[in-house]
Image: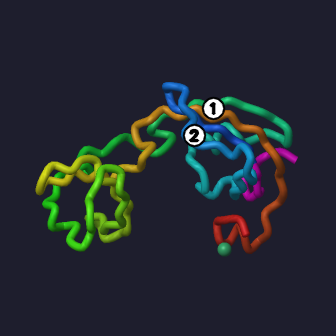
Amino acid sequence: MTIDKDRVVSIHYKLTNDDGEVIDSSEGTEPLTYLHGAANIIPGLEKELTGKKVGDSLKVTVKPEDGYGEVNPELIQIVPAETFKGVDKLEPGMHFQADSPDGHAMMIVVEAVNGDEITVNGNHPLAGQVLHFDVTVDSIREATPEEIDHGHVH
Ligand code: ZN
């Protein structure tokens, strides 16, 4: 069986950035399982996996436009410290849930704390990055009708 639309695929992977630093890896844990053709994983990786079979290994380089998108400067903002009323000590690297301009929940990261001026970033942490995947296909099976209906693996 090869990887195709409406099949459930498990992969082991290692993700490194352009500097060769490991960002994420399934080593020592369960493989990543996803429904192929349902946009469960980034398009640049999904496209390259199509047609592969169990045991195949591949290296995939994904540009930002096929990954997590380019950095959107509008999502980097300076807000007053009072926005974080109730937070004891505000420090760079802290994550908060916020409402995006169109009303969806989004994750923001505190980039810098300058007295009353807090720089926050709502971009995906991997936005703007070229991603390098080392992938091995672990298993492939047909998805159930319910999984196809839901667009994810059960
Ligand atoms: Zn479901």
In the image, is 72 to the left or to the right of 135? left
Quarter of image, res 147 = bottom right
Residue 119 pos. (x, y %): 21, 50
Numbered circle sitting on residue 105: none
Q: Nearer the viewer, residue 18 or 82?
A: 82
Amino acid type, label 1:
Val
- Which of disc 2 and disc 1 is earlier in sequence? 2
Circle 1: is it few (<14), some (14-19), or many (20+) Cα within 10 Å? some
Segment tinted magenta in the rendering: 1-10
| Figure quadrant of the C terminus | bottom right
Residue at x-position 44% and y-position 35%: 129
In the image, is 116 to the left or to the right of 62? left
| SS category of the residue bearing label 1 | strand
Numbered circle sitting on residue 44: 2
Q: Are marks 1 and 2 in contact (CB under 8 Å)?
A: yes
Q: Nearer the viewer, residue 132 or 46?
A: 132
Q: Is residue 116 above or below residue 98?
A: above
Residue 114 pos. (x, y %): 15, 49
